[in-house]
Image (cartoon, rainbow, N blue to C red):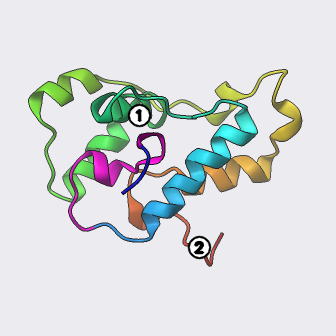
Amino acid sequence: VASRYFKGPELLVDLQDYDYSLDMWSLGCMFGGMIFRKEPFFYGHDNQDQLVKIAKVLGTDELNAYLNKYHLELDPQLEALVGRHTRKPWSRFVNADNQHLVSPEAIEFLDKLLRYDHQDRLTAKEA
């Protein structure tokens, strides 16, 4: 469905019912890579590690809320790999090399794209 670095959480946790909001996640990954000069933005070595990389940025409390909403459970081995992480503020990714590319509007746009819950992401029309 997608290159690993752009795969949405719904694919990584085996949610069967995904839609075009998956493309908005991929856009968020590309946009984050561009504004933070970190490509790929989520650099997982395999699908499991990809979810770990996402959880280290978006946090595990939010991941668990997403899993609970859709009645999903992680494989115990994957759950152990994911661990527990707090959500990182987007400002943590801003540095001297990329600050000229980052604006409050860019951060707000990114934040509305990179959401675990596909129903909470911007639609293409809203973007």
Q: Classify 25 as above or below 81.
A: below
- The quadrant in which the N terminus is found is bottom left
Q: Position of residue 19 (x, y in %)?
A: 37, 71
* Amino acid of disc 1: Gly
78 to 74, vertically: above or below:
above
The amino acid type of the residue labelled 2 equals Ala
Q: Residues within 10 Å of mark 2 (few under 14, many from 20)?
A: few
Question: Which is more toward the observer, 85 or 13?
Answer: 13
Q: Name the side, left or right, on which 43 lies relative to 51.
A: right
Percent position (x, y) of residue 119? Answer: 40, 67
Q: Position of residue 48 (x, y in %)?
A: 28, 32
Find the distance from the CA under tag 1 to the CA under tag 2.
Answer: 25 Å
Give percent across and percent down for residue 33. 65, 38
Residue 53 within the magenta-colored segment of the rendering: no
Q: Considering the image in quadrants, where does the C terminus appear?
A: bottom right
Would you name the residue on which mark 2 appears?
124
Q: Determine the residue positioned at 30% across, 52% down.
A: 11
Residue stretch in magenta: 4-17
Measuring 11% from the left and 35% from the top, which residue is drawn there? 75
Give the label on residue 59, or none.
Answer: 1
Q: Nearer the viewer, mark 1 or mark 2?
A: 2
Q: Residue at x 69, y 31 (%)?
A: 91
Q: Quadrant of residue 85?
A: top left
